[in-house]
Amino acid sequence: MADIERIWARHRAIFREQRALEATPLPPSLYALLAEAAAKYKDKKALVFFETGETLSYAQLRDRVDACAAALAALGLGKGAHVAVMLPNLGAYPVTWLALCRLGCVMIPVNVRYTARELEYVLDDAEAEALVIHADFASVFAGVGKRPPALVAARIVAYGGAVAGAAHDWEKIVAAADPSTLPVEEGGLDDPSNIQYTSGTTGFPKGCVVPQRFWLLMARTVLYQTRKSFQRLLIAQYFFYIDPMFIVPMAFLDGAAVYLCSAPRNARFMAWVRAHALECCLMFEPVFKQPEHPLDGQSGLRHAFTFGLTKENHAPLEKRFNVTAREMYGMTENGTCLYMPPEDTHMVGSGSCGIPSAHREVKIMGEDGLPVPTGDVGELWTRGPGQMYGYYKKDEANRDSFRDGWFRTGDLFRVDADGYYTIVGRLKEMVRRGGENVAAREVEAVLRTMAEIKEAAVVPVPDPVMGEEVKAYVQLQAGLTKEQVGPERILAHCEENLAKFKVPRFIEYRDSFGYTASDRVEKKALVAGVVDLRANSYDKFEKRWR
């Protein structure tokens, strides 16, 4: 009892701090935070693309954002305009995003690994009125058959070379822009800033409409969660994810420099940390799975956020990298919701996601819509400012996802007597592969477009490196055999229509499927009692049958 009382006393002190944080006014916009940082930190480094040598100071970043905003405004883009952005990690990406925020436009970040089919879907679903695209993705864009009516050549901007159908070059229009022509800032805290696509269970990604408040709350809350101040932060992900977009304003708060890689590479992760004396990062389990290096523990790394780290690897990771590593839980829909305080060292290796974040209320609900008792499993619901406004044009999904202002996460949790929350599973049919969410129904939909396939079902397979791998069960049309429709053909079809990370690793053929009362494949029956889900499958990576 004494231990519980001490833990709750500490948590009450943390929650008092968080209430004070919640009462602190936010800057009126993302651009206002940048302008304040530029005035205060001026020549300090803001963005460092260490693999290309591109560096922007705070003053240079502000000026570049102003010029980009003027250039985009000259194309007729103003408050509420939907602008898709398909760029790799380079300075033009955060510059374009912040410029769009200044104008009050809505950015649609596009996964750079999308196929033409996926790009076409996102452009159409988000009703894109403009597009900024790198020349590296010109062939993908060329494969888009149907474009939104408003997406005309006059509103397509290319970067890094020619793109068929683009009327403008990003560098040229930004260089020629006159920032003095800009109107007063249009975008504010509660204006939508992004339609952020996330894999869902409807078969295709859903666009989360999030306001500027989402990013500012995330930045300030996550920085508080570390109990530290940093001068060098690492972004080792593509910029179209939510993580880079909260880390950038998080850096603005302290005048820190953000170091960005050109593309994620787990094998280079710790070399980057050592070479640039980086202090804070998001670290995924594949980094820990890399071969050990004698200098792993000799860096300036002070805090690492982890997500779903295998609990047995938690203490070894901290020891190996000489870092405080703490779990965080959140989603594209609701930002950071739970975190493990750095001072709670007794929870290392527990597998818990921690306690509620500032600006977030959470509760665990049963199927009857009532809170479950402590220790029981139920669905996590969250509430608080800055959560997404809803899924764009998805009325049914929004009705299913919200109850009286609470967002239903679809994730199963329990909370213990000490107030620590632990995820135990997912209601949603999702494969979590190396930090990527893969919607089973999207992969299944693509598989079913093969004339030779009658039915398909996708399930996750546990993997020590990637967390989970994608496995597809397929039933061929009557009269066909796996020799006639081999796994290579099926995989080639998937590769033509899915981003690489969504393509199944394992293929298993089935003569038939069992079905539920609602006429859906009974996936539980596929995996029940199976010791090794890889068995009887073709392994794409090893190019053999298991």
Image (cartoon, helix red, strand yellow):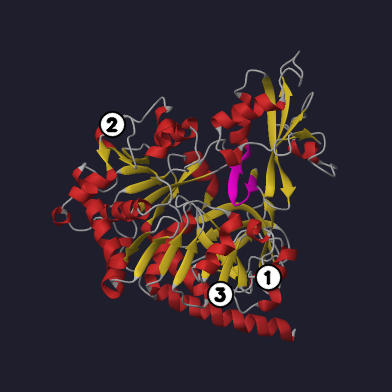
- Say if the magenta span includes residue 439: yes
Q: Which mark is residue 152?
A: 2
Q: Nearer the viewer, residue 150 or 364?
A: 150
Q: Earlier in the sequence, mark 3 or mark 2?
A: 2
- Magenta residues, as a range? 431-440
Q: Residue 514, can we see it?
A: yes
Q: Predominant secondary structure in magenta?
A: strand
- Say if the magenta span includes residue 55: no
Q: Residue at x 78, y 27 (%)?
A: 510
Q: Which mark is residue 277?
A: none
User: Which residue is under mark 3?
Assistant: 302
Q: Residue at x 65, y 45 (%)?
A: 431
Q: Residues within 10 Å of mark 1 (few under 14, many from 20)?
A: some
User: Which residue is under mark 1?
Assistant: 320
Mark count: 3
Distance from the alpha carbon under mark 3 to that under mark 2: 48 Å
Q: Position of residue 379 (x, y in %)?
A: 64, 55
Figure check: 472 above or below 306 = above
